[in-house]
Structure formats: C-alpha cells, structure tokens
Image: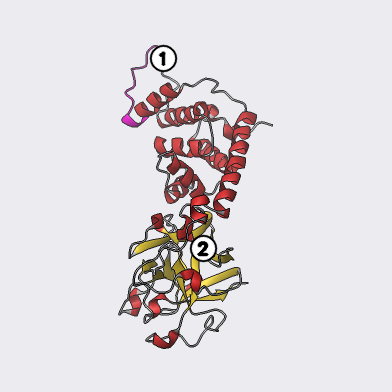
C-alpha cells in the first residue's frame, strides 16, 4: 500500500512536504525529546522546542533541521538526500513558462548550495523509492529505538549501577541512609515554602523545572521506587513525551539546574532519595493543607550522585516565587525552600 506522504520527490506544495515530515516522525515512534537526543548523538542540533514549532507550521524549515530530523528518524543517506532535494525544489520553484534552454542560470543561496554539496557527497541513487521501503525504514528505526529506550529506562549501564553515593565533606547524611518510603504512583510535587508545584513552562522544550501554580502545572509526575531504595521521578509531557527528572549534565556543583529529559541520559543524577525532613529546625514549616500528613512529607529530594538537595533560592518577595527554577543546593536543615510534599493524583 502506497503512502504518498513518504515520497518526497513527488511533493509539489509546501503543505504536502510538511505533512510528509509529520508522517515520517509519527512512523518513527519517537517523541520530540528522543529525536533531539538521537540527533545530539550524531553531533546535530535538533532542539525539541524548535522541532515542535517547525512541525506545527506550514512553512519550510531550514535544511539543517530537515536533515537532522530525517536522519534521527532512521532514514539512510539516499532518503535524506531525497528530502533535501524536495525542500530545495520547493524553496526555489521554476516557472513552467521558462524552459531549460532559455532559462538564466540560477544562483543558489548559501543554504541550498550546502544542501547540494552534501547530497553529492552522500550520493543519491534510488531516489524514487516506493512507500513500502520508507515504511520499512521507519519501522526498523522504531524497533531499534524501542530497544534503546527500554535499555535507558531500566538503567544507564554497568558504571552507573556500581556507583555508590559520593561522599561530600560537611554535607548531611547520605541519601541511601535515610531514604523515606513513599508509595509509587502519580503525584503533584509541591514546594512547602510557596505551595506551588513543580512544572515546566508551556511551549518551552528545555525541560527545565520551575515552580508554578498547581492547577496549571505540566507535565504529570510519577514516582518509581528502585531496588536501592531511591526513586526516579518520571515525567509525562503532553507535547514532548515521557522522560525523567534529573540534574543537568550530572553536575555536582551548587546551583546546577534540574530538568526533565529522556530517561537514562544522566545516570545516578536521575535517582533521588526522599529524605524525611525534621521540621523542628525549620523556620516556618508547613502544618496544614494537602500533602502534609506524615506519609506524604515533607521530604528533601536528594540526588544520588551529589548528596545535595533540590530546592529554590531564597526570595523575600512572594510575588517572585512563581517560575523560580528548581536548583541543586547544599542541604540546609533550617530552610523550608528545600522541602516538598507529594499530593496524590487519581
């Protein structure tokens, strides 16, 4: 059965080209963040937010984005060349009244010159493929990626599974020593000091975690308890798909940012101890409201790789609290900016 949306050499309109890219991405079975991750591994820039914006428009994306996307979907070089050729043809259409014998020589722009050179280097045999060939490529890519994702979500390699907590002089008790026991399930994770919930900004693809009004908070979060007693905080974003919360680039430094991303990229920096907090020394502990019962908190969230605590920079003005970024900080038992409660979501 033919799928004309996977035959780029037949595209005559930009709308058909964009529909084809969306179809190719859907057949890959990959989320936007997984595509960005695969492109990054090949040394290509394909930010999830940029890809989301490009695929939602009826406007030709830049050639670099088209190439990165088609390659990330698992297509071979000649198929990538076919998509680039189609994009170049649509970007510079030839008037039907002008024949090849009397048409002036066109001067390609820098971008399309690069497209042509890249296509020439890769070779372009067999551009007129049948739809079945494209679908086979996409299905194989999806199957391979499924295996990759399952591997990443079940662990990040032997080096990570053997790595114990890192000793940090002067810091509090190691996460594994006092990890609490919170049932697995879906939760809104609420900051005690502000009553706001952990969330990403709408339309932003970086995955950076902030605090925002709980009613507007996305993505959905869930706790998954691991064999060593730590937890993964799973995210399910309506646009960018499933992932895990973690400390960016496995950083151990103060003020490192926290973000949702593809599970498995950051190893132990995606694993947290839920340490029950002793609120006797906290200046203004939360005593009322949902989530403050003993079985739900408050807790400190402690990344396994650094033994620090997640929290927010102190703010004297309550109006500045919304959309403050979640950070990795040295643990301070006297501050409520590092305390969280877990409100179950049905």
Image quadrant in which you'd find residue 59: top left
Mark 1 surroundings: few (<14), some (14-19) or many (≥20) residues within 10 A: few
Q: Which residues are magenta?
A: 100-112
Q: Which quarter of the image is occupied by the C terminus?
A: bottom right
The residue depicted at 41 percent of the width and 22 percent of the height is 121
Marker count (numbered): 2
Give the numbered dot on residue 219: 2
Mark 2 surroundings: few (<14), some (14-19) or many (≥20) residues within 10 A: many
* Above/below status of 242 relative to 311: above
Task: Nearest to the eye among marks 1 and 2: give it.
Answer: 2
Position in image of residue 315 (x %, y %): 31, 77
Element assignment for label 2: loop
Q: Magenta stretch containing residue 2, yes or no? A: no
Looking at this rendering, what residue extends furthest in the right direction?
Answer: 1
Residue 337 in view in this figure:
yes
* Of the pair 338 and 2, the residue shown nearer to us: 338
Give the numbered dot on residue 100: 1
- Disc 1 or 2, which lies upstream in sequence? 1
* Above/below status of 151 relative to 195: above
The residue depicted at 51 percent of the width and 85 percent of the height is 289
Image quadrant in which you'd find residue 251: bottom left
Left or right, 284 with respect to 147, comes to: left
* Of the pair 285 and 51, the residue shown nearer to us: 285
Q: Magenta stretch containing residue 106, yes or no? A: yes
The residue depicted at 48 percent of the width and 48 percent of the height is 56
Position in image of residue 44 (x %, y %): 41, 40
Position in image of residue 63 (x %, y %): 41, 35
Gap in angstroms between the C-alphas marked 1 and 2:
54 Å
Position in image of residue 24 (x %, y %): 56, 39
Q: What predominant SS class does the magenta segment belong to? A: loop
* Above/below status of 211 relative to 241: below
């Amino acid at each position: 059965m033919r799928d004309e949306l996977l035959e780029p050499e037949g595209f005559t309109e930009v709308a058909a080209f964009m529909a084809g890219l969306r179809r190719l991405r859907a057949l890959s079975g990959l989320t936007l963040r997984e595509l960005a991750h695969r492109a990054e591994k090949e040394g290509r820039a394909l930010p999830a937010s940029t890809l989301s914006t490009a695929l939602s428009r009826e406007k030709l994306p830049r050639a670099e984005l088209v190439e990165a996307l088609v390659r990330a979907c698992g297509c071979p070089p000649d198929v990538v060349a076919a998509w680039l050729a189609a994009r170049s043809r649509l970007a510079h259409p030839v008037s039907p009244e002008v024949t090849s014998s009397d048409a002036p020589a066109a001067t390609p722009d820098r971008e399309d010159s690069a497209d042509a050179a890249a296509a020439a280097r890769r070779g372009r045999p067999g551009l007129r493929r049948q739809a079945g060939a494209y679908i086979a490529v996409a299905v194989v890519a999806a199957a391979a990626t499924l295996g990759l994702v399952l591997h990443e979500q079940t662990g990040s390699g032997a080096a990570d599974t053997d790595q114990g907590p890192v000793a940090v002089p002067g810091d509090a008790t190691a996460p594994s020593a006092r990890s609490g026991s919170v049932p697995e399930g879906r939760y809104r994770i609420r900051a005690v000091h502000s009553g706001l919930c952990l969330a990403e900004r709408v339309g932003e693809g970086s995955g950076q975690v902030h605090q925002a009004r709980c009613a507007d908070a996305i993505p959905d979060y869930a706790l998954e308890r691991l064999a060593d007693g730590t937890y993964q905080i799973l995210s399910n974003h309506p646009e960018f798909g499933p992932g895990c919360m973690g400390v960016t680039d496995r950083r151990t430094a103060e003020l490192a940012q926290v973000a949702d991303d593809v599970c498995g990229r950051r190893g132990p920096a995606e694993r947290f101890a839920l340490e029950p907090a002793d609120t006797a020394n906290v200046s203004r502990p939360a005593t009322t409201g949902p989530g403050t019962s003993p079985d739900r908190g408050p807790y400190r969230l402690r990344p396994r790789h650094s033994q620090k605590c997640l929290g927010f920079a102190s703010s004297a003005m309550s109006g500045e609290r919304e959309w403050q970024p979640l950070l990795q900080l040295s643990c301070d038992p006297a501050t409520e900016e590092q305390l969280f409660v877990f409100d179950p979501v049905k």
